[in-house]
Image (spheres, rainbow, N blue to C red):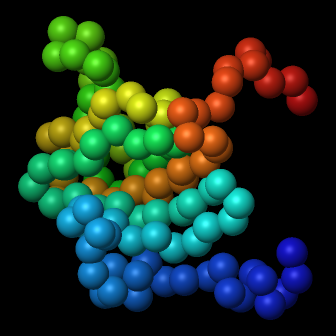
Amino acid sequence: MDQTSLTAARLAVTEALAAGTSPGGLRAAQLFEHGTMELYHYAPRGTDEQTPHDQDELYIVMAGTGMLAVGETAARTERVPFQPGDTMFVPAGMPHRFEDFTDDFETWVVMYGPDGGETATGAATH
């Protein structure tokens, strides 16, 4: 990637949020995209009203604490606590939401891959 591309890819979160909410009314701003990958800044307030997404997602918590609830039914929902620096994966199509989060909660969201998500291939080797 050349310097021009790097410069074009850089965007301040405050500038993106100043542009308003996403088309779905969520407090989210798309910052960058490349191929199937999209980078967002997400900072819900009060309640998290998001719906399942077509792509796999990574959440990288910037600030705040709370719980990530992931599951197809109330009886099969797993709740995982999070704090700054945590990274959480949610597969495409899986219902999920943030709960009991602090007023300063902010997260990066990386959506990637084909609609329906990527196929699991087992453990990565390095």
14 with respect to 45 (left or right): right
Query: Is 68 or 116 nearer to us in this picture?
Result: 116
Q: Give the vertical position of 123 relative to 102 (above or below).
A: above
96 with respect to 120 (left or right): left
The residue depicted at 42 percent of the width and 51 percent of the height is 61
Asked whether residue 89 appears in the rendered view, the answer is no
The residue depicted at 41 percent of the width and 42 percent of the height is 53
Q: Quadrant of residue 98?
A: top left
The residue depicted at 30 percent of the width and 34 percent of the height is 96
Q: Position of residue 5 (x, y in %)?
A: 78, 83
State the quadrant of the N terminus.
bottom right
Count of numbered circles in the view: 0
The residue depicted at 80 percent of the width and 90 percent of the height is 4
Q: Name the residue at the left extreme.
A: 46
Query: Is 35 or 42 nearer to us in this picture?
Result: 35
Q: Position of residue 37 (x, y in %)?
A: 63, 56
Query: Is 43 or 66 nearer to us in this picture?
Result: 43
Q: Give the vertical position of 114 relative to 60 (above or below).
A: above
Q: Give the vertical position of 90 relative to 125 (above or below).
A: below
Q: Give the vertical position of 117 relative to 102 (above or below).
A: above
125 with respect to 115 (left or right): right
Q: Position of residue 16 (x, y in %)?
A: 41, 82
